[in-house]
Image (cartoon, helix red, strand yellow):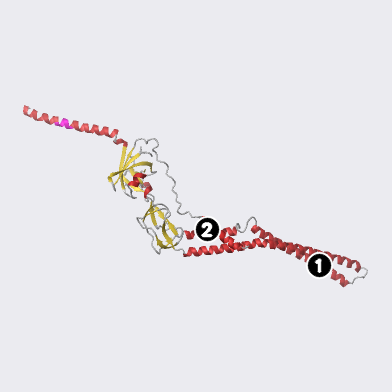
Amino acid sequence: MTPATQASENPRKRLLLLATLVFIAIGIAYAVWWFLFAARYESTDDAYVHGNLVQVTSQIPGTIVAIDAEDTQHIEQGASLLTLDPSDTRIALEQAKAALAQTVRRTQTLFVQNDALAAEVAMREADIEQAQAALDKAQSDLQRRSALGGSGGVSGEELLHARIAVKSAQAGIAQARAAYAASKAKLETNRALTRGSTVATHPDVLHAADQVRNAWLAEARTRIVAPVDGMVAQRTAQLGQHILPGTPLMTIVPLEQLWVEANFKENQIHEMKPGQRATITSDLYGGAVTYHGTVVGVSAGSGGAFSLLPAQNASGNWIKVIQRIPVRIRLDPEELRAHPLRVGLSMQVEVDLSAPEAGAAPAEPAPQRTSAYAHDGQQVDALIQSIIQENLGS
């Protein structure tokens, strides 16, 4: 090998050696970066904004006569959304009020009859005493005539009349006792119907009062209100439409109660646990806005397990597909209020797999409640009391 050839090969060897050393250094740096930093994070772009989709339905059948809310409109809990025709419910309420008034009067008659029946029983007792006196007199007369009959002082016809008088008196006392028993039974039955109650607390009156409450509640439900604060979406209700209970009319989305559902691969979640921190960006705002969330929990199954038609891999044509597990991430309410999101938006999520800080675990979600369907019962109770008082009489 000539000196010129050796001189040309030496720089080439040095360049190859230098390139090898550079790649080795890059690999070592990447390995250090991975073990010290990147291994502590898992990320995915298969994440979307989720929220409660509160469906508005009617509790009674009816025809829509007014619509007070439109799509994209923000409404507050208790605000009027729809109004149904109140004609039928108003008539039903008037009928229930009339039935209550009639029941009060009929029940009051039962209480008044107690005194009348007690007087009738006392009169029947007097009739028994009177019939007993008549029997005693007839028997005495028969004894006297029977004693005189042996000496011929009384005719046979007169003695026969005395015997007939005794039988008639016996029939009279039997009849008086039967009338007393009938009056006594009627009094006991009437007392049983009113025992332990007043007119206002009688079971028939209470039942009629409940019918008034049902009719009053049905009329109140002709005004359909918002169960929660939020934005109106998917309004399908139309004027003049006849609806049945449970018919979907519109949806309300509480935009202040959104969360992110990130679908991580099954080999990414073995170290995920509630309380870990997450950094989130959205396609809506790009990298200009960063949300800071907290892992709430990992789903009990993959998305395929809860799908309408789960995959069936019992056939011979099986190809393994890595599954994704939904992870729920709670957003910071202040950040969400400053930069609102919408349900269904795409998000990029990165979770810090470090152990959660003390006290960082998310609190248990508060039970969801609504008072929009609560009605003040004092108004209908006052109505019922006025009907009872008006029909009690003196």
Q: Nearer the viewer, residue 329 or 67?
A: 67
Q: Amino acid at mark 1?
A: Lys
Location of residue 136 by image quarter:
bottom right
Could you tell me which secondary element the residue under label 2 belongs to?
helix
Please give the residue where the numbered disc 2 appears in the rendered image: 380
**Magenta segment boundaries in residue numbering:** 15-19
Q: Main secondary structure of the magenta part?
A: helix
* Residue identifier under label 1: 167
Classed neighbour count for the residue bearing mark 2: other residues with Cα under 10 Å, few (<14), some (14–19), many (≥20): some
In 3D space, how far apart are the residues under numbered discs 2 and 1 (Cα atoms)?
A: 65 Å
Residue 207 point in image, percent of width and height: 57, 59
Q: Nearer the viewer, residue 315 or 1?
A: 1
Amino acid, disc 2: Val
Residue 257 belongs to magenta span: no
Q: Quadrant of residue 288?
A: top left
Look at the picture and state if 148 lies above or below 73. below
